[in-house]
Image (cartoon, rainbow, N blue to C red):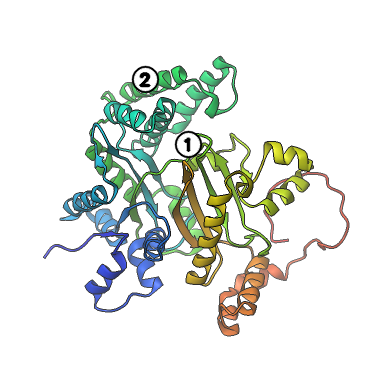
Amino acid sequence: MTKKWVYLARNGKEAYAEDIGKEPTLDDLKAIFGGKGAGLMAMTAAGAPVPPSFTLTTTACVAYMVDNVLPEGLWDQTLSAMEDIERQTGKKFGDPVNPLLVSVRSGGRQSMPGMMDTVLNLGLNDVTRDALANLVDNEWFSYDAYRRFVTMFSDIVMGYSRSHFEEVLEELKEKEGIKLDTDVSLEGLKWLVSKYKAMYKARFNEDFPTDPYIQLDLSIKAVFKSWNGARAIAYRDHEGIPHDWGTAVNICTMVFGNMGSSSATGVAFSRSPSTGEHEFLYGEFLVNAQGEDVVAGIRTPQQVSLGGSRAWAKFQGISEEERAAKFPSLEEVMPMAYQEFLAIVEMLEQNYRDMQDMEFTIERGKLWMLQTRTGKRTAAAAVRIAVDLVEEGVISKEEAIMRIEPEYVDLLMRPSFDPLVAKTLIAKGLNASPG
């Protein structure tokens, strides 16, 4: 009997319980589906708005690393899962009229932020791009998605650094006299896509792949390989993460934050990862953007909550009038989506009994949850969060004590600046020392 390598988010927990003959714990789910896959399944089961998705297990990655080929049965199971997503969405992968596009994302059992790879907008080619433009009546958006896909695929799957593509984009923006990617003209985007594909052909002596299934096959293998990338290995060495765990691969229906002013994408923490405060939601978002834009540094991200936005503006020396006009919060810009997000955040904290690190996209006013995981935090934040969760009745005192790792105690004993003493500001930056 062929081993099961692929599980749907809509019933993955139940299917895995049947396979192992018991109710799996959260740690069991993370071990087989990675933190991201387990999160997708948990959010889907809880009724949160999650795009239809499925997960290739960490054991599939381990098997791939042994022989450097996909294990027997995995591709057939992947095709079957794609058909299930097609039924859920009413779209078809590679269809010239109503195409299904997906993301392919890594996900280890322990969080490794930024260490492994993601491909967005997979399934695009000249035909499906045209269909996408017709479906949403937005040609600019379709070309923006296409140029992003060619860049990501070339970089992550083929090893052709994205810096080459970004250099061409910067030259185009300079020629058009603009600073933001969102201001590039439609004709400019059309030229970019053509130029990017010509660069790909010149580099690899073959056309950019147009068959969505070839794109998918190559992307799955690339994500498996990213587990043994130099950055990932160095991170695991530093964090003491075993090298034989492998990564899961999550294939998720694409939702788009770059479809205009009613769309957005962002990341948020349910509590401050720096201090552990729980005064408001901590996070950033951008209107008319995809996930990579939030951390790219090209545009100034806006704060998710009004309280966070005002605190950020005060720190930056920006007046309330300027803040509200130029950098309004998600709470102000899209209040209905924000209130829905707030309720989901509370539900996720109760489910995981810990501070959560989340990714979301709003597509034309509709909120979608893309990820939740237990958030990284400073030593000071870890203590405060543990104490607050005890006071809120979420965890016991004993569990709170066990959550404070020995190195946190060491860091808290180091000299630090007194937060109550007046200081003269001489520079701004990101803290990089325990104190």
- How many marks overall? 2
| Residue on which the image places disc 2 | 194
Query: Is residue 366 at all visible to an observer of this figure?
Result: yes
Classify 183 as above or below 119: above
- Earlier residue among tags 2 and 1: 2
In the visual, does 415 lie left or right of 212?
right
Q: Is residue 311 above or below residue 14?
A: above
How far across and down, in percent of the image, does residue 30 sit? 38, 66
Residue 243 appears in view: no
The x, y position of residue 248, in whole percent, is 34, 57
Which amino acid, mark 1?
Answer: Asn
Tell me which corner region of the image, top left, top right, bottom left or bottom right, holds residue 294: top right
Q: Which mark is residue 162?
A: none
Residue 269 in the image, given as x and y percentages of width and height: 58, 58
Q: Nearer the viewer, residue 61 or 279?
A: 279
Which residue sits at x=72%, y=41%?
Answer: 323
Q: Is 190 placed left or right of 11 in the picture? A: right
Closer to the observer: label 2 or label 1? 1
Spatial separation of the CA atoms under disc 2 and disc 1:
20 Å
Residue type of the residue flagged with mark 2? Ser
SS at circle 1: loop
Q: Which mark is residue 258?
A: 1
Q: Which of 234 and 7 is in front in this view?
A: 7
Label 1: how many residues lie within 10 Å, few (<14), some (14-19) or many (20+)? many
> Residue sitting at 76 percent across and 47 percent down?
315
Q: Quadrant of the C terminus?
A: bottom right
